[in-house]
Image (spheres, rainbow, N blue to C red):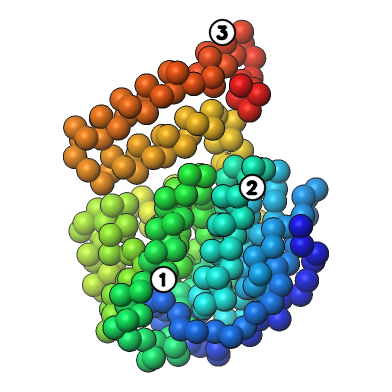
Amino acid sequence: MSETTTDTTTGTAADTTTGTDAGTTTGADPAADTTTGTGADTSTGTDAGIETGTGTVVVELRGRVAVVTVTRPEVRNALNVGVLDGIEAALDACERRADVDAVVFTGAGEKSFVAGADISQLVGYTLQDGLRARMQRLWDRIQDLELPTIAAVNGVALGGGNELAMSCDIRIAADRARFGLPEAGLGILPGAGGTQRLSRLVGLGRAQEMILTGRIIDAEEALRIGLVTSVVPPEELLDAALGTAGTILAKGPLAVRLAKLVVRGGAETDQRTGLLLERLAQSLLYAADEKAEGASAFLEKRPARFRDA
């Protein structure tokens, strides 16, 4: 467990990212950043944080939920190599630890969830950077994580920040949140999954309109078109995310993991193949101990104790 430390990360000028009046964001991968630090423990509960090896991402445990926070509020939580390193380290730790069963992603401060990558670094990107696609691969890893993931979108989520949110299973937004993929205005496209995930969430027509125009939408519109699942006041956001995680964790853990796998897999294939995935997953669950516990608990009118099964 890490000790509480101060984040001394510095970034580029604030007007190189979108999230307030100046600038635009990009979902492209950030270039090299030499900033390093130590993981900070900002836990307000009984559990300490998880070491990430950078000062740009902190992780605290809330019961069995890891809350991963991007901590660059001075540059609207813009993505750089230090942030990507920190998120990768957090995922490594969450997958390794037996006491983590869900992950919540959020941003520090009141203005931004993640405002995208620092545009001042864009000029140096090359063909090799595009093919390397580190951010796309990292967001893919979040989508493929066996643990349920929730984005608690506390503010602006543009470019790579919006793509991070879309890679999560569930998105809950503060009512001040804004969403967009404005990369076309920079002569590039959303390259961390935005061209693929947005249309799967909101439909092809709306996705084309948002990507081609770069239009930024508010939380209420995001809710209406299906980009987020709920909108709450900012002061209730983290509790809402943790409450949703708690509801999921009360279910059978194997059932949750297989349901996530089947829903995701089925969405990317034809219905007949998806139904086959469903049938196979259900067969595994019928043979698992937690099915017996769930059925017994229901018949005995008591809460299920899946983790003892």
In front here: 189 or 173? 189
Q: Tell me, for residue 299, which label it has, or none.
A: 3
236 w.r.t. 212: above or below: above
Quadrant that contains the C terminus: top right
Q: Earlier in the sequence, mark 3 or mark 1?
A: 1
Q: Which residue is the site of mark 2?
A: 97
The residue type indicated by label 2 comes to Arg
* Mark whose residue sits in front, 3 or 2: 2
Question: Residue at coordinates 53% horizontally, 14% vertically from top-left?
Answer: 292
Whether residue 265 can be seen here: yes
Q: Circle 3 — which element?
A: helix
The residue type indicated by label 3 comes to Leu
- How many callouts does the rendering have? 3
Q: CA distance from mark 3 to mark 1?
A: 49 Å
Q: Is residue 197 left or right of residue 240?
A: left
Relative image position of residue 16 (x, y in whole percent): 48, 87
**Would you say the residues marked 2 and 1 are in contact, meaning their CB atoms lie under 8 Å apart?**
no
The residue type indicated by label 1 comes to Arg
Examine the image and state in which quarter residue 305 appears.
Answer: top right
Question: Residue at coordinates 19% horizontally, 32% vertically from top-left?
Answer: 272
Instruction: Pick out the residue farthest to the front.
Output: 96
Q: Tell me, for residue 134, which label it has, or none.
A: 1
Relative image position of residue 111 (x, y in whole percent): 57, 71
Examine the image and state in which quarter residue 264 appears.
Answer: top left
Q: Earlier in the sequence, mark 2 or mark 1?
A: 2
Relative image position of residue 49 (x, y in whole percent): 73, 57
Question: Residue at coordinates 51% horizontally, 78% vertically from top-left?
Answer: 80
Q: Circle 2 — which element?
A: loop
Quick one: label 1, few (<14), some, or many (20+) residues within 10 Å?
Answer: some
140 w.r.t. 70: above or below: above
